[in-house]
Image: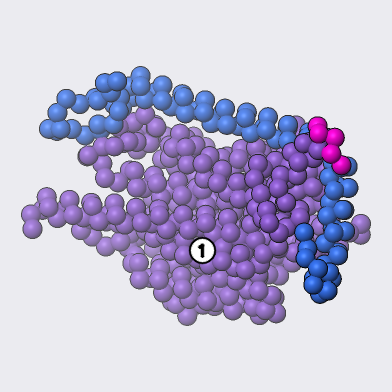
Chain colours: A purple, B blue
Amino acid sequence: MTEEAFNMLGNVNMEIYYWWSIALMFAIHAGFLSLEVGVSRVKNVLASSVKNFMALAIVIPTFYLVGWWIYNAFPDGFIPRFDEASLAALPWSENMGPNVADNATGVFWGAFALFSATTASILSGTVIERIRLSAFVILAGILGSVIWILGGAWGWHPEGWLLTELGYHDVGASGVVHTIAGFFALGVLFNLGSRIGKYKKDGTPNPILPHNLPSAFLGMMLIFVGFFGFLAGCLIFIVGGQWETIYGTPATLSSFAFNGLMGFSGGIIGAYLSSKGEPFWTISGGLAGFISVGAGLDLYYPGLALVIGAIGGFVAYLLGSLLERKGVDDPVGAISVHGFIGFWGVLAVGIFASGYPNVAGPEISLFGQALGAIVMAALGFIPGYGISFIMKKLNALRIPPEVEIVGLDVSEIPASAFPEGIPATAGKITPILEKKKVSGEE
Amino acid sequence: MKTSPITSWEGAEAYFTFGPASMGVFLSLIIGVVILAGLLVRMVRHENESFERAIHLYSEYVTEGKSVHEKDEEAPAVASGVAIQ
């Protein structure tokens, strides 16, 4: 085989690899949709679904417009670079469209766009049943196309300052995606508030039960499938050479398989133990397990990954319950599973994998990981709180209480989820009532 | 509309419609931003109209909801073989 043919074959393989990574990540969104629909009450299932469609539709083009440029321009902090890589990421550059001399940019951009949409979808579940769709899409666009990708430029880039200054290691994006999204959501919930009826007058929580728990389980299973696309996209395919992490260190897909699966199992076991077998939290433990080991997927011994995942799953339920008791109404537990367990995942690398060398920075350390995790949490929380605070003051964040009581589907959505059996969505009741008024029917 | 930036595939690189950093590309981007902004405006208007209508009809809806639930509570009719509407 000639060198030219070898390179062409390698490039095509690389494109195919990321292409299917992108496709698999859509399963994450199918999963979030099924999860949120299951957790929503019947009166809000369609509104929850539409929110998920619109998150994808908003984040992908906004990430094209600004997100990819932010990733390439801000590895030094808040001051943008105007070098070749940054200019090539502007949406009018020759690399940002069909180009026979560039096999890589489109599929890398696509994979990052789906990471972005995943980040925005983490917010989606926390705010169901009471946020305005318009407020959500603005927040999703900002989180997905600006905030997380700024964190990505800092801590998930071969020249990001967290790597070059602190040796930050977060290969599977535990901090960059999950901590940022979880803490952004926490900031939003402080302003959005809880669902009507969630808390008694004395502040103790009332259970608002999912209308379809099996749908939530199916959603979680789809998210697990999608995670293999997500994690695949976290490795760099080198034509003619070994795989590399995003930090330029060598790695293998096999290491991801070992540790991802062991962490997943540990997470389920840990959550089962702490929740005493509560099924929603038990299956959420699988996600917590993936996130717990995400930052060090390339480094851990698989037995250690099981332990780290088990700690994450165990703690996820306890933190989720604590947040609920403290007045944070997060119906899907995302702030605990993504925000706090993402934090744990970054910290775990510092505890269990200090001393590993980096190519472009100091060796991995507990200090660097702890500081990196704090930066990620702050980068999520501060804009999440600040932007939602402004929206709240403009009365643009939350739906009116009457609409919340009646349900979003019957108020806003021109369709019916269960027209043959569920009274709360039996036809579009508002027009039916209007028709009755016009015709004088009783 | 002739939009090809190339006249031959020989040595072609970026070949997308209009070509890099061209008037057509900038116009497409501007229209894209306008579409996104338009979506947001339409969404807010739809919400405001829907919410206003729902608030206006709230009391009737609650009454309707109660009557539906009262009908549901007649379910024991199934046991006596009476068809349910």
Q: Is residue A122 visible?
A: yes
Q: Is residue A391 magenta?
A: no
Instruction: List x then y, in percent, for residue A339.
Output: 62, 58
Task: From the viewer's perspective, tell me whether residue A363 is left or right of residue A12.
Answer: right
| Residue marked by disc 1 | A222
Where residue A54 sits, quadrant-wise, is top right
Task: From the viewer's perspective, tell me whether residue A379 is left or right of residue A240.
Answer: right
The 10 Å Cα crowd at callout 1, few under 14, some 14 to 19, many 20 or more, is many
Task: From the viewer's perspective, tell me whether residue B31 is left or right of residue A394.
Answer: left
The residue at 75%/44% (across/down) is A429
As drawn, which residue projects farthest toward the left?
Answer: A2
The residue at 46%/73% (across/down) is A261
Instruction: List x then y, in percent, for residue A357.
Output: 39, 63
Instruction: List x then y, in percent, for residue A98.
Output: 29, 37
Q: Main secondary structure of the magenta part?
A: loop
Residue A161 position (above or below residue A336): above
The residue at 28%/23% (across/down) is B3
Instruction: List x then y, in percent, for residue A359.
Output: 35, 56
Residue A307 position (above or below residue B39): below
Where residue B75 sits, quadrant-wise, is bottom right
Bounds of the magenta segment: A438-442
The residue at 27%/62% (across/down) is A242
As drawn, which residue projects farthest toward the right?
Answer: A201
Instruction: Choose between A16 and B78: the one closer to the eye.
Output: B78
Q: Amino acid at mark 1?
A: Leu
